[in-house]
Amino acid sequence: MHIILSAAISADGYLDDMADTPLTFSSREDIEDVHALRAMSDAILVGANTCRNDNPSLTVRHGNTDIQPTKIVMTRSGNFDRNTRFFTEGTAEKIVLTSGDPCDHLKDIATIIPFDGSANDATCQLQAHGIKTLMIEGGAQIQQYFLDAGTIDEIRLSKNQHIIVNDPRAPAFPQHALPSATVMREQTYGQNSVTWHATAKNIDQTLLRHAVAQAEKSPAADRYRVGCVIADTHHRIISTGFTQETDATCHAEQAAIDKALKNGFDLTGCAIYSSMEPCSKRASAPKSCSERIIDAKFKKVVYAYREPAIFVDCEGHAMLEKAGLTVIENTVFAPLVIRQNAHLLSGA
Ligand SMILES: NC(=O)c1ccc[n+]([C@@H]2O[C@H](COP(=O)([O-])OP(=O)(O)OC[C@H]3O[C@@H](n4cnc5c(N)ncnc54)[C@H](OP(=O)(O)O)[C@@H]3O)[C@@H](O)[C@H]2O)c1
């Protein structure tokens, strides 16, 4: 399972203030990005206090609203108002993950999943329920609980530079979790500066998810929608690309490599992550993406989905391995790649 923790904080690290209504930290662009991340996740999880205090609907309301991930709330007490938006809004499955009260009173409106109180068992139970990508949205207790258990793969932290809470009673993001994490990427969305941190758990898988996210930008309707990121030896994303980013025939890896070289990066020893196996034959360009990867002296290639023989017999994996690169096929996000390419892979 891949677990993303997403939090929005004030400039001084708080998740909320002590007022009755929840504080909004996110700019519109930031909210849109969070909703895109929700749409890429199988499920969104919050703690019972967040559900009770903020009454969030936890639906996707920007971008592709056809996709509605499963909603999960964690509780010991089972103390919920059935009329909260968590239960009443959206068509997605609602799960109550409980380590205490059996929650029989919610059986008609939610799936009840008991667990033994440990974060490991919580994730095992959810995985057994078919959840492969989980987005945890808080609050403070839940963040601390999963971070302390070492179950988080990546953290998306959005800091509003203009809001100061300065109230020690208010819930704060558990900052202590960050020092051991690598900053993969930083981006500004209006008043929010967003940092993406990878924990040591599975950095290749985390960077691969960012490649798969790039594919969402591809407009391709008659070819594969592929996304790519390039990371340096410190796991920092130095370039990104997606199919048709620069012209009608451009491949994702080609776009990312060309941009990186144009920006003066030496790609020797770097790693390239692609949502699909890099191509080995190209009718529309003198070199295939696999040849470009070999020429640029990359050390490692990680991809999510092996190209099926629809257009050509792709031999990218074998070609790259023969050239001495480490090649990893990680299929955790393969269902997402199939969904992104449903126009060509509906039978896959
Ligand atoms: N800025 C942001 O990104 C963001 C995001 C989300 C929330 N928030 C804020 O965070 C605040 C809420 O945070 P919080 O720390 O008070 O609460 P929380 O983390 O949302 O929820 C805590 C609750 O989760 C349940 N829980 C915790 N550990 C559990 C375990 N091991 N097994 C089963 N259930 C467990 C318990 O529910 P029971 O009491 O039912 O047993 C506990 O009271 C709100 O002010 C909200 O606005 C901010």
Image: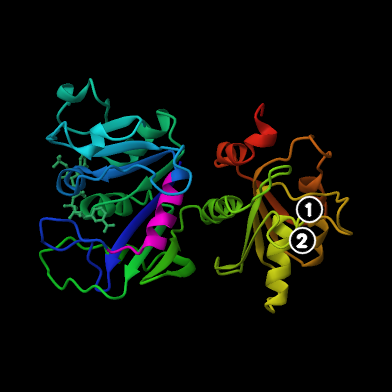
Q: Is residue 71 left or right of residue 267?
A: left
Q: Secondary structure at mark 1?
A: helix
The residue lying toward the viewer, choosing from 108 and 149, is: 108
| Tag of residue 21 | none
| Secondary-structure class at tag 2 | helix
Magenta stretch contains residue 321: no
From the top left corner, tell me how far across and down residue 35 is, in percent: 41, 50
**Where 45 falls versus 271 (above or below)?**
above
- For the residues marked 2 and 1, what is the alpha-carbon distance in whole angstroms? 8 Å
Look at the image and tell me in which quarter the C terminus lies: top right
Residue 208 coordinates in the image, percent (x, y): 57, 52
Q: Residue at 78% x, 49% y: name it.
A: 279
Residue 171 is left or right of residue 145, and the answer is left
User: Could you tell me which residue is drawn at 61 percent across and 37 percent down?
Assistant: 338
Residue corresponding to mark 1:
320
Amino acid type assigned to the residue bearing label 2 in the image: Ile
Image-quadrant location for residue 190: bottom left
According to the picture, the residue beneath numbered tag 2 turns out to be 293
Q: Can residue 194 be seen from the camera position used here? A: yes
Q: How is the image coloured?
A: rainbow
